[in-house]
Amino acid sequence: MTSTSRPWGADAARIAVFAALIIALGLVIVPLPGGVPITGQTLGVMLAGLILGPRLAPLSVLVVLALAAVGLPVLAGGRGGLGVFLGPSAGYLLGWIAGVVVIGLILGRRRLTWWRTGLAAVIGGIGVVYLFGIPVQALVTGVPLGPTALSSLAFLPGDLLKAVAATALCLALQRAYPRAFGRTALRVA
């Protein structure tokens, strides 16, 4: 085993921890007047992408989605079952997978900086997730794309706050426990 390789058990444990974090953050719900709440799950998705990278983060999201598919109440509001993949939030759930890949690719193996970390969280954790979510929501609800995108702006302030929190947590974790990243040569600038 070389110094850059890790045993699969360590990676599996990290995947499981972030899947559990995403599930646990689904319990954090902030009600909005429109009836659709803001949840903490996207914070977990952003953290998974920032810390696990483009190879392992999608696996943590896939664990959550697989658990939801078999009917476990692991999504926000205690939702689960195949029906969630046919509903208005289906595109957002699929966007989590692409989002964590983009986050990990933007962050890469370079030195961590606050601006690159924040940019990765915003582009992958918000932009890519919305890119998948809004069209599917429009299709499922029968509402045109423009009004659906406009109504999604209600979630943007909360998502931006989550990106700031994910950035701060990622940089703090890198300073406190760099081994959590499982990558070599990452330093905080």
Image: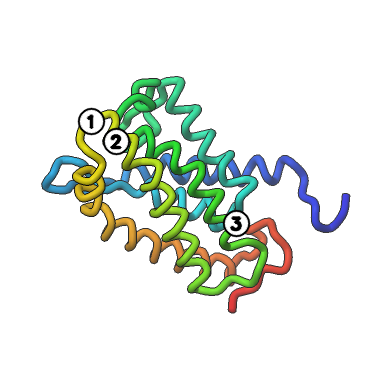
Q: How far across and how far down the image is residue 101, in percent? A: 56, 49
Between residue 139 and residue 44, name the one nearer to us.
139
Q: Position of residue 43 (x, y in %)?
A: 40, 53
Amino acid type of the residue tagged 3 in the rendering: Leu
Q: Which residue lies furthest to the right in this view?
A: 1
- The residue under the point 64% across, 46% down is 55
Q: Is mark 2 on a helix, strand or loop?
A: helix
Identify the residue shown where x is 42% and y is 40%: 23
Closer to us: 7 or 146: 146
Q: How far apart are marks 1 and 2 (CA)?
A: 6 Å
Pointers 1 and 2 in contact (C-beta within 8 Å): yes
Residue 137's tag is 2
Label at residue 141 = 1
Q: In which quarter of the image is residue 127?
A: bottom left
The answer to whether 176 appears left or right of 89 in the picture is right
Tell me how far mark 1 sits from mark 3, CA to CA.
Answer: 32 Å
> What residue is disc 3 on?
105
Q: Find out whether the residues at labels 1 and 3 contact each other: C-beta distance under 8 Å.
A: no
The image quarter containing residue 137 is top left
Q: Earlier in the sequence, mark 1 or mark 3?
A: 3
At a point 43% along the width and 27% down the height, the residue shown is 68
Instruction: Give how far apart the Cα atoms at labels 3 and 2 are.
Output: 26 Å
